[in-house]
Amino acid sequence: MSTLKRILIVGPILSRRGGVAHHVRTLLNSPLKQNYEIHYFRVGSDYHDNHLKIISRFISTPFRFIKKLWTIKPQIVHFNPSFDLKSLLRELIMLVLCKRFGYSTIVQFHGGNISSLIKKDQLPFYIKLILKYSSRCVVLTETQKNPLLNFVPEDNIVIIPNMVDTSIFNGKKLNKGSEFVILFMSRIDKTKGVYSVIEAIPHVIKKISRTHFLFAGEGPDKAKLEQLCNVNGLSKQVKFLGHINEMYKINLLAKGDLFLFPSQLCEGMPYALLEAMAAGLPIIATPVGAIPEIIKQGENGFLVPLEHPEILAETIIKLLKNKRLRAKIGKFNRYTAKTKYDIKIVIETFSQLYESTGYRN
């Protein structure tokens, strides 16, 4: 029988795409396994589940969860809800069960949507109850923490950023040719700013013709934008790669010259940005959510206004024409990722959180 303290991590199915699933996969495969007995409880549905299966799984989750608690008897249960109502209500039910049976709990909020939930200085009742029943609350940034201070004692809120294994990324650029490679890695839809990038492309290639734009990801607008680029004669310089695996992504980042993240959403701490930083890439993003906490203007990238493709194009051209500036920003990003967001550093913070939360005997 293991003498290690038992941590139950609750999260979505590991095969899902997106930040929460990525985070849970990272936790489960992290150095935490050296000091704790890590267990996983799956919640939520798969992409291919029909409506009946989704309802059935939602109803059965509390019963499966009670069985899991009785089976492994964890010292701490670590929840990772997303910000949709169904996820939050499901987690609330499980939190109530933990409270009833005396289990210590940690709720980690992902994304940057906490502020949007506050209406007239009031939180929805289900968020209030989640905060009330959780032993500790984890957020990614100060931007997420500050709105909660009116509802939760500051000691109960811990900031722990997302993490990246910097050892798998090479800060040295593999692209030695005369061609420039600009990367977009996100969901292909309007909310991620992909239309601004497409509109900026003609302005960029008019000034610097040897530029290629690579879009990695799936989304509802992928086919439409691919056709639009073909009609406008951009097919040689614009490629839509679809979903790419981890190794392909690492190699692609090593070949890139710039990374674009012109999102329109209230972002938290996107893994895509941290990976681009670990790869030593300059970043152009928009000042949404907590992005200004990560990207400092002129230091490790540039922030451009939302839906201003002409300014985005000007900023791309500025960086492509200045090799020294690109190298300086890329080096700074690589250093920041290694000293602030590296998995070993962040996991140590989680260990400290687990130790300070208190255990159920």
Image (spheres, rainbow, N blue to C red):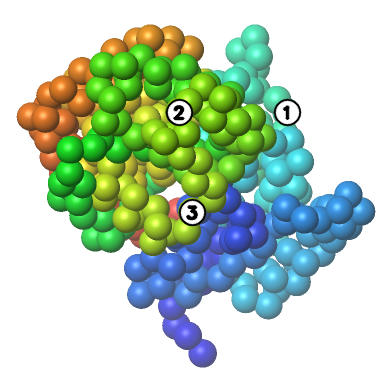
Left or right for 80, reference 140 = right
Q: In this view of the protein, which residue sits in the foreground, 212 or 191?
A: 212
Do the residues under discs 1 and 2 have CB atoms within 8 angstroms?
no
Q: In this view of the protein, which residue sits in the foreground, 31 or 51?
A: 51
Q: In this view of the protein, which residue sits in the foreground, 257 or 339?
A: 257
Q: Residue at x 60, y 60 (%)?
A: 15
Task: In the rendered view, tell whether residue 338 sits above or below residue 150.
Answer: below
Of labels 1 and 2, earlier in sequence is 1
Q: Where, by quadrant of the figure, is residue 299 drawn?
A: top left
Q: Residue at x 7, y 29 (%)?
A: 324
Q: Which mark is residue 253?
A: none
Percent position of residue 188, x then y: 56, 34
Looking at the rendered structure, the kind of residue marked 1 is Phe
Looking at the rendered structure, the kind of residue marked 2 is Leu
Find disc 2 in the rendering and name its residue: 234
Give the residue at the far left of this rendering: 324
Of labels 3 and 2, earlier in sequence is 2
Give the residue at the far bottom of this rendering: 1
Instruction: Tell me if I can see residue 38 in this picture.
Output: yes
Q: Which mark is residue 244?
A: 3
Task: For label 1, count other residues whose C-alpha is less than 10 Å away and answer few (under 14), some (14-19) or many (20+).
Answer: few
Task: In the rendered view, tell whether residue 40 sits above or below residue 257.
Answer: below
User: How far apart in space, not on screen, are marks 3 and 2 (Cα)?
Assistant: 22 Å
Q: Nearer the viewer, mark 3 or mark 2?
A: 2
Q: Describe the element under mark 1 as helix, strand or loop.
A: helix
Q: Describe the element under mark 3 as helix, strand or loop.
A: loop
